[in-house]
Image (tube, rainbow, N blue to C red):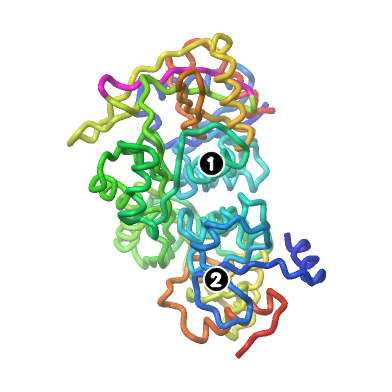
């Protein structure tokens, strides 16, 4: 019997599909004979009472989830997401540098420092990638802090905002597609495969509505992992292999039959009826990994 | 890491590169962060910066060194951990550094249930990194928790405040303060986290010094005497003399 703590924040329950998935984790854990308790940000002192920690709250080295992950790690508990994966995945610059080093195909990317942020450099980037370009803050998650710029004015406006929290930002070639592949990977094996569709007329999966706090999300089309293209899965596994052995969601674009990695996310979304639609065993696989 | 470094010193091979955003008074050649970040130097990297915060230039210098496969001080792991008070304290305690009890929470009520007033509060959010707040009563505590948690979006790290908290500038674990217990804490913190330049918060009580927090130094906090001490330490580290 393994005592598993699932670290969540209140917002994890605000989407009913996510809340249902969390209940599936709990029920599956109990069926397998494990204890499974939710712990919140005010319950960190209870971590030593557990054998494993499963983090579902958004991870970033600057958020509470990293404190949870590293505390569990220091105590020798099994933890998903582990602190190293969080550190790499939360900073896109870190992971693109690794992709470059280990030859993982990824979207054409340049990094821009605050010091080089001037007219000549911006013009060179437009020259290199054409217009528009995609500007990403290194700490992007859930499609936030990813914006498109078609002229120097909007480039400057976006970059200035992203430079508040990072001295470097990411600029990428704009590669429009109807969907991004999302490959769920656990411990070096493919867990699930989906297509994250772009909402109609939009270019990314989650888009903030003008003047409103709410997001609109594209549909999720799920495939059986066994039926997904082999080369897609190989690309996803290669990208994850340089990060770690945890749970990841790899975003991949298909361009003229080639697969290029957009990014690897730790802490990937798992919503009832979406990621778990075709492969029902994902809960069990994750829990068995935690209880190993 | 430490062992590897002493081997390297003994071997006498000069393959240390000092990357610094501070103007040092030393004979040891130094490189600007922006120059280093464009290079692919294979050396032992000593990264001297007043600020190693995640996603700041000081952090990217260490990251660049690691991606190139170099040994570096500080590592990105230590840079991330040392500035997060609960992780700093957990790892410090594990290594025998005296700390006060602490609690991670966004609830003033929970703090009051655990600790008597006054309490010290350190931020654990992505934005504020400077200083701490103290609360002597309920009203002050609610106000401090609300502000440091950025309206309850993040948590805070609370510690009972029994003595007096002083901030100490530490350069490779050396500080200008004479108190031997504080000196011992600074030295030990450097051994564990290897943050060459930082500000330590230490609580002194009944002859004991306890670690409370570690934060980046602001450039304007660096006095000429600090630069002297830092330069001396860099020279000593690199095994070369110090030109006064």
**Pointer 1 chain:** A
Residue placed most toward the observer, B74 or A152: A152
**Where residue B154 sits in the image (x, y, percent)?**
39, 49
Residue placed most toward the observer, B129 or A99: A99
Residue placed most toward the observer, B237 or A102: A102
Residue under the point 54% across and 47% down: A45
Side of B155 relative to A24 (left or right): left
Q: Does the magenta run of residues contain B138?
A: no
**Pointer 2 chain:** B
Mark 2 vs mark 1: in front: 1
Which residues are drawn in magenta? A189-201
Measure the C-alpha gap from mark 2 to mark 1.
27 Å
> Is residue A8 positioned above or below A202 on the image?
below
Residue that badge 2 annotates = B197
Residue placed most toward the observer, A212 or B211: A212
- Magenta stretch, overall SS: strand
Residue under the point 53% across and 81% down: B227
Q: Does the magenta run of residues contain A190?
A: yes
Residue under the point 28% across and 50% down: A156
Residue that badge 1 annotates = A95
């Amino acid at each position: 019997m393994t005592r598993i703590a699932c670290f969540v924040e209140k917002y994890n329950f605000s989407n009913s599909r996510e809340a249902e998935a969390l209940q599936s984790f709990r029920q599956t854990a109990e069926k397998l004979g494990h204890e499974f308790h939710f712990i919140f940000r005010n319950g960190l002192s209870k971590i030593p009472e557990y054998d494993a920690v499963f983090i579902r709250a958004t991870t970033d080295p600057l958020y509470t989830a990293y404190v949870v992950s590293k505390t569990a790690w220091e105590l020798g508990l099994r933890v998903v997401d582990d602190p190293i994966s969080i550190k790499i995945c939360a900073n896109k610059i870190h992971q693109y540098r690794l992709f470059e080093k280990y030859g993982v195909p990824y979207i054409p990317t340049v990094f821009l420092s605050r010091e080089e942020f001037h007219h000549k450099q911006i013009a060179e980037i437009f020259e290199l990638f054409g217009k528009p370009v995609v500007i990403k803050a290194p700490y992007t998650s859930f499609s936030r802090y990813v914006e498109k710029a078609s002229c120097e004015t909007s480039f400057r406006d976006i970059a200035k905002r992203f430079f508040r929290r990072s001295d470097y930002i990411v600029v990428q070639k704009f590669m429009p597609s109807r969907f991004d592949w999302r490959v769920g990977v656990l411990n070096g094996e493919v867990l699930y495969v989906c297509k994250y569709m772009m909402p109609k007329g939009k270019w990314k999966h989650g888009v903030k509505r003008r003047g409103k706090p709410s997001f609109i999300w594209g549909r999720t089309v799920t495939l059986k992992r066994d039926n997904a293209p082999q080369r897609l899965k190989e690309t996803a596994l290669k990208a994850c292999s340089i990060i770690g052995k945890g749970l990841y969601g790899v975003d991949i674009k298909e361009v003229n039959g080639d697969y290029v990695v957009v990014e690897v996310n730790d802490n990937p979304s798992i919503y009832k009826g979406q990621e778990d639609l075709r492969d029902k065993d994902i809960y069990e696989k994750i829990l068995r990994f935690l209880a190993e | 890491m430490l062992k590897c470094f002493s081997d390297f010193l003994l071997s006498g091979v000069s393959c240390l590169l000092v990357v610094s955003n501070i103007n040092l008074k030393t004979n040891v050649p130094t490189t600007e962060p922006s120059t280093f970040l464009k290079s692919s130097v294979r050396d032992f990297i000593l990264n001297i910066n007043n600020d190693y915060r995640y996603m700041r230039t000081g952090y990217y210098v260490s990251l660049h060194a690691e991606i190139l496969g170099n040994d570096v001080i500080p590592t990105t792991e230590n840079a991330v951990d040392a500035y997060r008070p609960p992780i700093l304290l957990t790892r410090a305690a594990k290594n025998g550094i005296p700390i006060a009890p602490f609690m991670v929470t966004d609830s003033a009520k929970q703090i009051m249930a655990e600790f008597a007033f006054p309490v010290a509060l350190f931020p654990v959010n992505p934005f504020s990194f400077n200083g701490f707040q103290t609360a002597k009563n309920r009203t002050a505590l609610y106000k401090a928790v609300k502000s440091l948690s950025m309206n309850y979006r993040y948590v805070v790290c609370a510690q009972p405040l029994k003595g007096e908290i002083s901030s100490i500038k530490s350069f490779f674990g050396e500080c200008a303060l004479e108190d031997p217990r504080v000196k011992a804490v600074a030295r030990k913190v450097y051994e564990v986290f290897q943050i060459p330049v930082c500000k330590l918060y230490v609580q002194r009580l009944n002859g004991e010094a306890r670690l409370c927090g570690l934060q980046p130094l602001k450039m304007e906090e660096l006095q000429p005497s600090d630069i002297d001490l830092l330069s001396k330490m860099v020279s000593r580290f690199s095994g070369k003399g110090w030109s006064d």
